[in-house]
Amino acid sequence: MEKKMAMTFIPAAHATELFSNAELSREEETQIDVDDEAENNKHINLLAITECTAGETQDNLAAVITHYVHTLNQYNSRNLGYPGNQDFNYEVLAPLLHFHLNNAGDPFLGSGFSLNSTAFEVCVLDWFANLWEIEKSEYWGYVTTGGTEGNLHGILLGREQFLDGILYASEDSHYSIFKIARMYRMQCVKVGTLVSGEIDCIKLQTSLLAHKDKPAIINLNIGTTMKGGVDDLDLVIQTLEKCGFTQDQFYIHCDGALFGIMLPFLKQAPMITFKKSIGSITVSGHKFLGCPIPCGIVITRLKYINVLSRDIEIIASRDATITGSRSGHAPIFLWYALKKRGLIGLKNEVQKCIMNARYLHDRLRDAGVGTMLNEFSNIVVFEKPLDDDFTRRWNLACKGNITHVVVMQHVNIEMLDSFVSEFLQKRSIWLKDGRSQSLSETNAERDATDPCFN
């Protein structure tokens, strides 16, 4: 049975050798595993909420949290496979944890609940509207719980414009897109992709021509989850027009969870702008910006919102969001992250991630490992490790026979050097044991032999 990547508590007594010594004997490893399991069970038991009438003491609660923080720090020292920026400090916002803040309703109208942060939220929305080139008087948006809610909202707007519309999404799209199609009971056409991960517009054209009688709702990926492929917006629009779809017959939603905020700071990167024929864009706030709680932003054209809006008397506001109650803390974290960095700080962080990704790509390539790095991407793709423990140790994300490292702000050269050294050492063992497969033996592996992998 495949082991799951669940987090376990790491006993402080073993944390150092567990994460720094790759050459332990089998006897030592076995003993540590036994000790770890016992210690982990102890702390899992402390997490159980029992029928304690007096309540737990503050000292005991603090001890559990302290131990958990230690565990998090150890895991974070090898956190490479998922796009969450861990390089942040929000201590100045700690006093806000003394308040319940709720932004229910339309952020531009406020609500009857005065403990809200809609003033911060609107400032964040204005910043993103300016980034994606849409006038204040022409846009609407809100702070979401994350990229999936942004996708839910954007695709819902498209569906409401075209009730009989067909959703087109590349096979490399985030899994939420296909879940949303099921939730909304929309016909969904999955379109093939290029090796880079971006949508294949020749295949898109074939699909569009097969359904010319119905409007098209396009999910456009600004950076695919696994490979960081960016769908060519201009080519997609040209393909729609070539197939006879006028602007009143299609809606384009842009899923820019990670790259939506990065591309504007890269020279010669594709421009994602409302000056083109798009309907909505969403990004995640916990990815590049590094908010400690999952959140996101969705921006759309104001003209699309009325069909969703309903006046709600009990909150003295208008309801046009997916959820009712919304976090009032998330907009402040986003506001703080943007204000503290400024445009120059954001640009420097984007460039650092791109440079470090190229460094990792070059190191793996020079060692003979099939590797791919798309232009304007911080996602380095290569062959999947053949050891589940190694995959968990470095918190890698895998799909088929490939894996990737997402080089975020907290990923420094020292961490990458440590990873490469251990990966190459393990890989040599797998090769000697005959466990390695030729990269051309399966479709997933075939990608890594393409010229893009170099």
Image (spheres, helix red, strand yellow):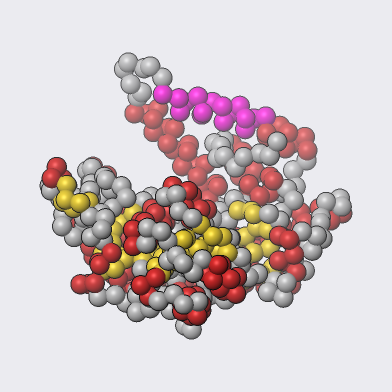
> Is residue 372 highlighted in magenta?
no
Image quadrant where one finds the C terminus: bottom right
| Residue 12 pos. (x, y %) | 55, 38
- Left or right side of 357 for 107: left
Q: Which residue is painted at 60% across and 74% down in the image?
A: 202
- The chief SS type of the magenta part is helix
Query: Toward which corner of the image does residue 257 lie, by quadrant?
Result: bottom left
> Is residue 43 highlighted in magenta?
yes
Q: Residue furthest front?
A: 213
Q: Which residue is painted at 68% across and 63% down in the image?
A: 382
- Left or right side of 441 for 147: left
Task: Identify which residue, 241 or 86, lies in the foreground.
Answer: 241
| Residue 397 pos. (x, y %) | 60, 53
24 up-or-down from 282: above or below: above
Task: Identify which residue, 167 or 200, lies in the foreground.
Answer: 167
Res 113 visible: no
Residues shaded magenta: 34-49
Query: Toward which corner of the image does residue 15 lie, by quadrant?
Result: top right
Q: Residue furthest bottom?
A: 268
65 up-or-down from 424: above or below: above
Number of dots carrying numbers: 0
Image quadrant where one finds the N terminus: top right
| Residue 42 pos. (x, y %) | 54, 26
Q: Which residue is painted at 18% across and 60% down in the image?
A: 108
Res 69 visible: yes
Task: Identify which residue, 8 or 273, lies in the foreground.
Answer: 273
- Left or right side of 82 for 333: left
Q: Which residue is painted at 25% across and 75% down in the image?
A: 135
